[in-house]
Amino acid sequence: MQRLQAFKFELMPNGEHLRFMRRTAGACRFVYNKALTVQKENYEAGGKFIGYVTMARHLTGWRNGDETPWLRDAPVHPLQHALKDMERAYRNFFEKRAAFPQFRRRGQHDSFRYPDPKQIRLDQGNGRIFLPKLGWIRYRKSRVVPGELRNVTVSHSAGKWFISIQTRREIAQPVPRATSAIGIDVGIARFATFSDGSHLEALNSFRRHEKRLARARRSMSRKVKFSSNWKKQKARIARIHAHIANARRDYLHKATATISKNHAFVSIEDLKVRNMSKSAAGSVELPGRNVRAKSGLNKSILDQGWCEFRRQLDYKLDWQGGWLIAVPPQHTSQTCPCCGHVSADNRTTQAEFLCVECGYENHADVVGAINILARGHSAAACGEPVHLGRSTKQEPAKAIAREVSHA
């Protein structure tokens, strides 16, 4: 099987490299915003959506025209890829996977991509890489990059520049070394509770640094906007946010790596996090209720990183030869795993579960994890409608059940 994998490193640029990368990121942002403006004007005039091929002709005119001759200084492939990003944003909007495309702002997600591997040379022995019009640039080599080079993305975050090198390589079809199955119930008080009774504590990375972040924002609000001190404080805030995100990502990587190595079959809840974390403020005509409490709940939900947890479990189980199944979450913590009685009275508090029918007692999150595992087994054996991870998207449900039973 083929494995696509990206390796991210911090760049060590000199002054000339920094100026070039800033200009290139700005040129890509300009092309994206310019193309989005053309699409909007074309729609208002009654025209149809402009595809990439036609939009690329506009890019040629912008590069050769007198209004934006500085676009010729930027490599053409990253500019073309900015048009592809815009087209993908529209496609996601048409397919109702995302909101309408927005204009890109300076300093937010500055990046550009080199999609042609023939123009890229990677010298791992000396820890450097050659990029068109940028030349050789060093990076902090922390590991070897295996496989065939596919593309390279240069990005800026919290005052630092990073490079992401995507490779492709052939590997043998993985066979799971573990033989166990487990159900996982994610939450706020406990980050993840397993069907065997164990659990992972919540990291709460944002909550730990919330006061520090609030002080930094107050300090920034007292400075003259766009002054030198204001820009320095803004950079400090960006570093705090980067530290929060890095701590959360590191915690999730360690947790998902351990789970994928120790279990061949994982069942989780198919949670709609976007719907769960929607604002309850409402409108002026119809104001929401308990807005402050719901805002705190939304902050706690997003602080856990449930979507990233599921994404990492998906591909890591695929690499280990395991299976991931997401089952409907309804009543998982209100159903008795012993007698099957479903009632809201079974769970009177956040942590306690006591079946009013048979008297079964356990931690509510453990009960939820047990029921999630049972639903995963039922879905694999009977073909019930569930979301399958990409390692099981092409597998018949009964075949999955046979593999799990043999394991």
Image (cartoon, grey):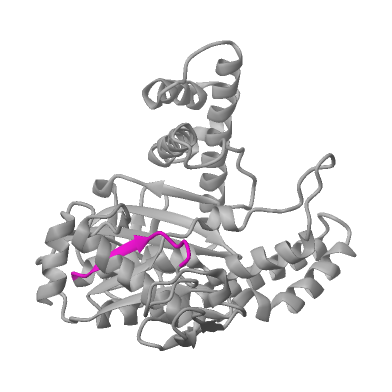
Res. 355 visible in picture:
yes
**Residue 113 magenta-drawn?**
no
Q: Is residue 252 above or below residue 116?
A: below
Report which quarter residue 41 is drawn in: top right
| Residue 51 in the image, given as x and y percentages of width and height | 41, 23
Report which quarter residue 142 is drawn in: bottom left
Q: In the visual, does 226 lie left or right of 27? A: right
Residue closest to the far front: 357
Q: In the visual, does 121 lie left or right of 197? A: left
Report which quarter residue 398 is drawn in: bottom left
Q: Is residue 46 above or below residue 148?
A: above
| Residue 399 in the image, given as x and y percentages of width and height | 12, 60
Res. 1 visible in picture:
no
Q: Nearer the viewer, residue 344 or 293?
A: 344
Residue at image point 40% right, 80% down:
255
Image quarter hosting the C terminus: bottom left
Q: What range is drawn magenta here?
A: 321-331
Q: In the visual, does 15 lie left or right of 184? A: right
Image quarter hosting the N terminus: bottom left
